[in-house]
């Protein structure tokens, strides 16, 4: 291990004002749905091909065509749900291209992502096989932009109709799967305001009503997720909820963090960035709090009972692509900065657990803020992966309110609160506290008053490092990885800890 939690550069040890927090273990909040820790896997670059699916004949160790190393790593963080096949890809995808004998499947061009050939060797059966291996919930995005509602209706029937009933159920059986699959979520198109068809919100809402009407799962509840806003497009949320709110179970929100957010052609580098871009990355990430608050408030107008979820089914960092790679493949390295971004976003989702009941980081393997990177037979776990590992107890846990007053981190004109927190009581009754220090220079002394909790000790694991862009590579895979953390004290109902600069700490409080 190259990174150490004890050896910090001198500035990291500079004294900072104390962070004062109160954990209210006696006034529990809503349950954090495990699908908030969902993933997104699109037919994009090496997200599927090479990253997950190598085919049965591959020299890369595999289980029926799925990479064994990738499956094992994803299972280890309890991936609860995977959204597929897109993204922009979804609104040009025709599900019939991806069923039947692999050799007979048509090759098409992936017009959204790099203009490469798509041979459709990964289709519905292969996706469902992946979900079975992971024990994950299914989330399929239907083509609304360039296909008729009957195509969606038939795809849902193909997946869910009982064995031996309809023509499509029998076709599924001939293709190797007699039993129906459970389809937990159906996406009604993707980004209908953009790559999904450049629609106006009112038109998209009418389309949503139409497609939702005819998509009927034969084997139980299937939650219908409408294509929602990106960022601060509050008018979109208002129109969707007003026109289609009664016919949907969720509204998707997409928001990507870019260090430079003026032009998509100049987003900033994944590595070797200046501190100013660390700071803008943090301040842009924290906008998620405003977006969730304001979209939720609009949804409350039409749905005060909070029946319709806000599904943040695309979020994460988006940098300039790794030099020398196909820019359409959206490949980027993942550093300690991404780990801090992940911790901040998960804390925000936990604070909005009453409305945010599903989310998907973009994307699971090799694309944007990935969990895993692969190159041929090699695989490496990213700092973001390790954040998901730390936050496993949050899946299905009860949120506990935690109030916090934080000092500010300043860089040039950027000023953001340095410390963020969330807390949960897991399904076994154990309390966990997550603390994120986004200040890259200063350690933060933190005191947490424990209301309604008799505790005597706290220990856990931390992710930190010396460089802002500390990262794992195929040659050095363990530079950023969780380390045991035993430097927290609990006495007289107060938890005291000094949170190292640029760190994500998860403590079990006993
Ligand atoms: O995740 C990459 C792309 O970002 C998705 O295909 C699209 O939905 C979004 O714009």
Image: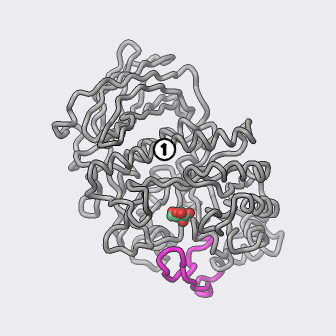
- Is the CB of mark 1 within 8 Å of ligand 1? no
> Which quadrant: the C terminus?
top left
Q: Position of residue 46 (x, y in %)?
A: 44, 71
Say which element carries label 1: helix
Residue 382 sits in quarter: bottom left
Q: Main secondary structure of the magenta part?
A: loop
Q: Position of residue 218 (x, y in %)?
A: 80, 60
Whether residue 470 is visible to the viewer of this picture, yes or no, is: no
Whether residue 468 is visible to the viewer of this picture, yes or no, is: yes
Residue extending farthest to the top is 492
**In the picture provided, is 328 more to the left or to the right than 240?**
left
Residue 458 sits in quarter: top left
So how many labels did they put on this image?
1
- Residue 468 colored in magenta in the image: no
The residue where tag 1 is placed is 287
State which region is magenta. Answer: 100-127
């Amino acid at each position: 291990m190259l990174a150490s939690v004890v050896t910090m550069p001198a500035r990291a040890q500079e004294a900072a004002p104390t962070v004062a927090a109160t954990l209210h273990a006696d006034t529990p909040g809503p349950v954090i749905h495990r699908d908030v820790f969902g993933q997104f896997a699109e037919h994009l670059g090496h997200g599927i091909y090479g990253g997950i699916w190598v085919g049965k004949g591959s020299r890369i160790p595999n289980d029926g065509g799925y990479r064994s190393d990738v499956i094992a790593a994803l299972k280890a963080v309890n991936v609860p749900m995977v959204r597929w096949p897109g993204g922009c890809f979804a609104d040009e995808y025709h599900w019939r291209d991806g069923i039947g004998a692999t050799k007979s499947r048509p090759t098409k061009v992936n017009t959204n992502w790099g203009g490469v050939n798509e041979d459709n060797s990964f289709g519905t059966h292969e996706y469902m096989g992946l979900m079975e291996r992971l024990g994950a919930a299914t989330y399929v995005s239907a083509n609304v932009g360039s296909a008729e509602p009957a195509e969606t209706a038939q795809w849902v029937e193909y997946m869910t109709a009982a064995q031996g009933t309809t023509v499509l159920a029998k076709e599924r059986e001939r293709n190797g799967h007699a039993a129906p699959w459970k389809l937990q979520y159906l996406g009604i198109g993707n980004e209908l305001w953009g790559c999904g068809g450049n629609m106006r919100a009112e038109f998209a809402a009418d389309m949503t009503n139409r497609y939702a009407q005819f998509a009927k799962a034969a084997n139980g509840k299937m939650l219908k997720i409408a294509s929602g806003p990106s960022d601060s497009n509050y008018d979109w949320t208002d129109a969707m909820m007003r026109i289609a709110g009664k016919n949907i179970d969720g509204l998707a929100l997409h928001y990507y963090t870019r260090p430079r957010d003026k032009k998509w052609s100049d987003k900033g580098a994944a590595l070797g960035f200046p501190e100013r871009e660390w700071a803008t990355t943090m301040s842009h990430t924290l906008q998620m709090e405003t977006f969730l608050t304001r979209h939720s408030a609009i949804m409350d107008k039409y749905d005060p009972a909070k029946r319709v979820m806000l599904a943040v089914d695309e979020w994460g960092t988006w940098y300039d692509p790794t030099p020398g790679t196909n820019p359409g493949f959206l490949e980027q390295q993942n550093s300690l900065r991404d780990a801090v971004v992940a911790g901040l976003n998960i804390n925000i989702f936990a604070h909005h657990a009453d409305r945010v009941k599903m989310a998907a980081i973009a994307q699971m393997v090799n694309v944007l803020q990935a969990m895993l990177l692969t190159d041929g037979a090699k695989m490496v776990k990213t700092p973001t992966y390790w954040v998901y590992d730390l936050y496993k107890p949050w899946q299905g846990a009860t949120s506990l309110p935690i109030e916090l007053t934080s000092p500010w981190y300043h860089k040039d004109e950027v000023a953001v609160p340095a410390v963020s927190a969330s807390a949960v009581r897991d399904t076994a009754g154990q309390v966990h506290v997550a603390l994120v220090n986004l200040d890259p220079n200063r350690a933060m002394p933190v005191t947490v008053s424990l209301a309604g909790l008799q505790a005597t000790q706290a220990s856990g694991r931390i992710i930190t490092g010396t460089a802002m862009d500390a990262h794992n590579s195929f040659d050095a895979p363990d530079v950023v990885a969780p380390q045991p953390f035993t430097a927290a004290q609990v006495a007289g109902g107060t938890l005291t800890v000094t949170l190292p600069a640029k760190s994500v700490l998860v403590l079990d409080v006993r």
